[in-house]
Amino acid sequence: MSTDLAPGKALRGPLNGVDTPTLFATIDAVRGNPEIAKFQFRARNRWVSGTHNRSVIRGFYGAGQEDTSRTEDFVYDADHPAVLVGSGNGPTPVEFLLHALAACLTSGLANIAAARGVQLTEVESTVEGDIDLLGVLGLSEQVRNGYQGIRVSLSISGDAPEEVLRGLVEQSRARSAVYDVFTNGVPVEIDVTTR
């Protein structure tokens, strides 16, 4: 993540709940050793019943080693609502995508604001995605399966002028990993094992 701190600008203490000195130390460490910038995140998923399934997230590789800082699994259920032949045991997988986009933009925004010395007082967003089921249900070859459009409505307030706050959002968008995946795509391989 680029925080775009002006050269020679004094480092700040923690702000917005962000450990700013550690953030800058991390940026300096990666600048000095780009190999530690390579991360691999993972999720494991198991079918439960019907459209209900459960993902577990814990370990990842980063900073040149397998991370062991997480002592417990993060567990997320996914399902379809009844109208889509599910039991509503969790959000749909496509809703997790909207969450990921909002979360990535907000996390980046907090870091960038802290690095630039802007005290945030509130950040809220609503993310909407439009899907036409004609694609998913195989009823039209002209309709794509995934989202046809996504809209993010973001509200931000803090101790900076409007143009500075808008600049924080723009920088977060420009450096968001999830926004990048949504807008540029990424190759996905599926390796199947049968038992």
Image (cartoon, helix red, strand yellow):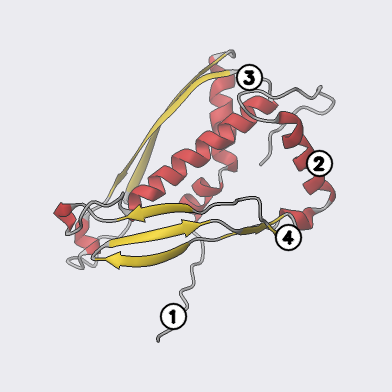
Residue topped by disc 3:
118
Real-space Cα separation, disc 2 to disc 4, in angstroms: 18 Å
Density class for disc 1 (Cα within 10 Å; few <14, some 14-19, many ≥20) is few
- Residue 113 or residue 14, whichever sits in front: 14
Query: Which mark sits nearer the N-terminus, 1 or 3?
Result: 3
- Does residue 4 lie above or below 120 as drawn? below
Real-space Cα separation, disc 4 to disc 1, in angstroms: 27 Å
Q: Position of residue 47 (x, y in %)?
A: 34, 67
Q: Position of residue 37 (x, y in %)?
A: 72, 53
- Does residue 37 lie above or below 128 as drawn? below
Q: How many marks?
A: 4
Badge nearest the viewer, 3 or 4:
4
**Label 3 element class:** loop
Residue topped by disc 1:
192
Q: Mark on residue 100?
A: none
**Callout 3, which amino acid?**
Val
- Does residue 115 lie above or below 27 as drawn? above
- Residue 65 or residue 181, whichever sits in front: 65
For the point 55% across and 56% down, which residue is it?
A: 58
Residue topped by disc 2:
28
- Residue 95 or residue 195, whichever sits in front: 195
**Label 2 element class:** helix
**Label 1 element class:** loop
For the point 23% across and 51% down, which residue is it?
A: 88
